[in-house]
């Protein structure tokens, strides 16, 4: 899912990525909102809250919202730096952001119950989730070539509307490509909504422990890619060694 990029990336890779990471974002969105009363997967809604805080001269609230927005930006910057400095084709370039996100979610599961609405807890807990979602959004966007975004649905619904309009045109040339794009958008929407519903149900039943479920998904994604790459490399190495030995064996066989 992460180890392929550019021309080596297929629609199937993006579908897997959209399904699993969209599910993760939906879980975090619902659990973060129910636990902290804060939207933690995007910053669009926070712009209106910031404007309200400034209009009412509630400077403390405005400062917290600005910090949240900067933390989301910092998460995206961190992912971008990992892929740029380590290289998009290096395994650890995507492993580091995922491990950071897993760590933040584990800490939310452990310490979430201590949230008391104070300034420090507002910055530390919802802010850390915004940082994690900034990480994920940038990572997925860069790996997929800006085709997949999983932490919010506004752009996805917009793109879906445009693509549906293109599909109904009679003179469209490549309908299969448009259908593939529509399929991807529907997967993202369904995965996010499924995650949000599951997150709400789980949070009402087990509270902040529900943050363990997106951790499980991210761990699976991480191990799946690492295991798959290792198996593929082992197979290629073994095949090359077998071919070399086969050639040597043929050289030593007596002529018939």
Image: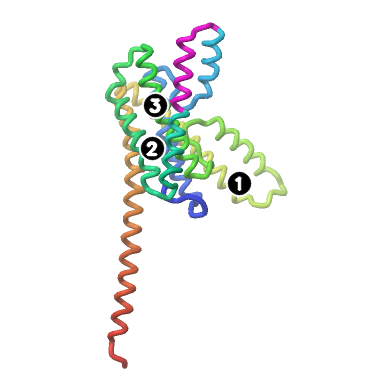
Q: Do the residues labelled 1 and 2 touch (CB within 8 Å)?
A: no
Q: Are marks 1 and 3 in contact (CB under 8 Å)?
A: no
**Vertical position of residue 245 compared to residue 46: above or below:** below
Q: Does the magenta run of residues contain 230?
A: no
**Vertical position of residue 213 compared to residue 52: above or below:** below
**Vertical position of residue 239 compared to residue 143: above or below:** below
**Vertical position of residue 219 compared to residue 228: above or below:** above
Q: Which class describes the residues within 10 Å of circle 1: few (<14), some (14-19), or many (20+)?
A: some
Upstream in the sequence, badge 1 or badge 2? 2
Q: Which label lies toward us, 1 or 2?
A: 2
Residue 178's disc number? 1
Q: Nearer the viewer, residue 18 or 240?
A: 240
Q: How far apart are marks 3 and 2 (CA)?
A: 13 Å
Q: Nearer the viewer, residue 87 or 69?
A: 87
Residue 222's disc number? none
Q: Does the magenta run of residues contain 58?
A: yes
Q: Which region is colored magenta?
A: 56-72
Q: Which residue is tagged 3?
A: 129
Q: Which residue is tagged 2?
A: 97
> For the residue labelled by badge 3, is the local secondary structure a helix, a strand or a loop?
helix
Q: Which label lies toward us, 1 or 3?
A: 3
Residue 197 seen anywhere in this rendered image of the structure: no
């Amino acid at each position: 899912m992460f180890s392929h990029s550019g021309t080596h990336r297929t629609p199937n890779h993006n579908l897997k990525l959209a399904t699993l990471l969209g599910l993760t974002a939906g879980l975090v969105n619902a659990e973060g909102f129910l636990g902290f009363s804060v939207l933690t997967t995007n910053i669009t809604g926070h712009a209106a809250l910031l404007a309200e805080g400034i209009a009412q001269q509630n400077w403390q609230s405005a400062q917290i919202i600005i910090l949240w927005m900067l933390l989301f930006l910092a998460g995206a910057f961190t992912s971008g730096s990992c892929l740029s400095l380590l290289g998009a084709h290096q395994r650890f370039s995507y492993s580091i952001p995922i491990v950071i996100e897993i760590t933040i979610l584990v800490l939310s599961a452990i310490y979430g119950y201590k949230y008391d609405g104070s300034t420090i807890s507002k910055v530390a807990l919802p802010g850390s989730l915004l940082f994690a979602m900034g990480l994920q959004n940038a990572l997925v966007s860069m790996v997929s070539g800006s085709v997949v975004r999983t932490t919010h649905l506004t752009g996805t619904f917009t793109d879906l509307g445009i693509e549906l309009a293109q599909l109904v045109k009679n003179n469209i040339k490549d309908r299969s490509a448009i259908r593939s794009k529509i399929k991807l958008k529907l997967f993202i929407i369904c995965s996010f909504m499924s995650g949000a519903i599951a997150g709400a149900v789980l949070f009402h039943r087990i509270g902040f422990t529900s943050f363990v479920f997106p951790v499980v998904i991210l761990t699976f994604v991480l191990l799946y890619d690492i295991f798959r790459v290792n198996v593929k490399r082992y197979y290629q190495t073994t095949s090359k060694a077998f071919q070399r030995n086969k050639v040597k064996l043929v050289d030593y066989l007596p002529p018939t």
